Amino acid sequence: MKYLKKIIPFAVSVFFVILFCYAAISKALDFENFQVQISASPLLNGFSQFLPYTIIIVEFLGAGLLCYRKTRNIGLVGSFVLMIAFTGYIALLLSTSKNLPCSCGGILEKMSWHQHLYFNIGCVILSVIALGLNLKYSRPAD
């Protein structure tokens, strides 16, 4: 059982590395469309000059932090914060807007907004579980 408590944070970290890299690469490859979608958002259009770059950089940075045991806790906290922000954004859009531009990229773009909300809530829960287990059961990094 103790092995499982150590492997879960690692597995969740791998999941977030794949998710963040996939999302960032999808956005970078279709950057012009990503920028247009951000500027079409009723909540983000004022930030459309720098936000697309920031999101991509933060997703890659978060993925990088999750790759090393020394920085995994910071990466898991970052994953939690990012997923809370993305989840809050989706929830706010769903409650206030009719026109919902999706700037997620790749296969995530194929989800309905409600499916995306549930997916993000699941990711928030995963990040909390992984962080808690990592703090409690992982030995300090050298």
Image (cartoon, grey):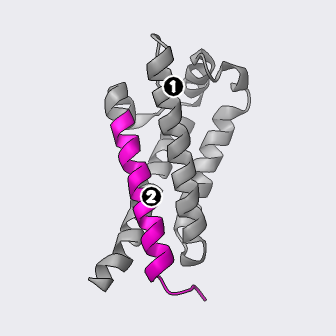
Pick out the residue farthest to the left.
1
Q: Secondary structure at mark 1?
A: helix
- Looking at the picture, does residue 83 appear above or below residue 2? above
- Looking at the picture, does residue 5 appear above or below residue 28? below
Tell me if I can see residue 101 in this picture: no
Tell me if I can see residue 96 in this picture: yes
Q: Residue at x 58, y 56 (%)?
A: 78
Whole-percent x and y of residue 24?
53, 44
Label 2: which residue?
A: 127
Segment colored magenta: 117-142
**Mark before the other along the chain sequence, 1 or 2:** 1
Q: Amino acid at mark 1?
A: Leu
Task: Using the image as rendered, state which of residue 18 and residue 88 is in the foreground.
Answer: 88
Q: Residue at x 39, y 53 (%)?
A: 125
Label 1: which residue?
A: 92
Q: Which mark is residue 142?
A: none
| Mark 2 crowd level (few <14, some 14–19, many ≥20, 10 Å Cα) | many
Main secondary structure type of the part rendered in magenta: helix
- Residue 4 is left or right of residue 91, and the answer is left
Asked if residue 139 lies in the magenta stretch, the reply is yes
Q: Secondary structure at mark 2?
A: helix
| Mark 1 crowd level (few <14, some 14–19, many ≥20, 10 Å Cα) | few
Q: Residue at x 60, y 43 (%)?
A: 56
